[in-house]
Amino acid sequence: MYAGAALEVVVLIIALVSRSSLKSVILKANPHDTAAQLHFAENFLNGILVVGALIAVGAWLWMAWANGSGRSWARGVSTALFVIGTLGLPTISFRAARNPATLTVGVVVWLVGLAVIVLIFNKDSGPFYRQARPLRR
């Protein structure tokens, strides 16, 4: 799960470094926009990318802590987050990918999520989640 968080940081870096390709995509989709509209759209979409990446990093770290602590609810939350990521993969990675690096990292993040789901539901993981864990204060 820490690998997923690290990959999300890579996604953020790629998004910020490839700002110019975002501008060309916006211009291609909206050729009649003014320079001010183009600038606003570019900044708005980059803001969404940054916030989304930060939320994703936080979710990966939260799930790493919760699953590492043996919280049984974390398996369900991890699965729900994986399903959301799977549903968003065609839109975010395939349709909105501005360059091959974005697409590649998006698929790798999904594969890490799949590996996490397989591992936390592995039959050998069951006893770890069934142990009573006192809440830490």
Image (cartoon, helix red, strand yellow):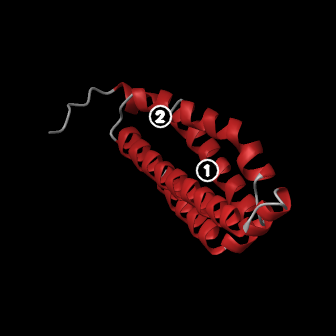
99 vs 60, left or right, is: right
Residue 7, x across and y down, in percent = 57, 61
Q: State the mark number for residue 125.
A: 2
Where 35 falls versus 71 (above or below)?
Answer: below
Q: Which residue is mark 1?
A: 112
- Which quadrant of the rendered structure holds the C terminus? top left
Q: Is residue 11 visible?
A: yes
- Answer with mark 2 or mark 1, whichever residue precedes in sequence: 1
Residue 23 falls in image quadrant: bottom right
Residue 127, x across and y down, in percent = 41, 28
> Which residue appears at 25% of the width and 31% of the height?
133
> In the rendered structure, which amino acid carries the disc numbered 1?
Val
134 vs 18, left or right, is: left
Q: Secondary structure at mark 1?
A: helix
> Which residue appears at 45% of the width and 45% of the height?
59
126 vs 33, left or right, is: left
Q: State the mark number for residue 35.
A: none
> Which residue appears at 74% of the width and 65% of the height?
34
> Which residue appears at 60% of the width and 45% of the height?
113
Q: Secondary structure at mark 2?
A: loop
Bin the neighbour count of mark 2 within 10 Å (Cα to Cα): few under 14, some 14-19, many 20 and up.
Answer: few
Residue 51, x across and y down, in percent = 50, 53
Residue 4 falls in image quadrant: bottom right
Where 20 falls versus 111 (above or below)?
Answer: below
Residue 122 falls in image quadrant: top right
> In the rendered structure, which amino acid carries the disc numbered 2?
Ser
Residue 1, x across and y down, in percent = 49, 50
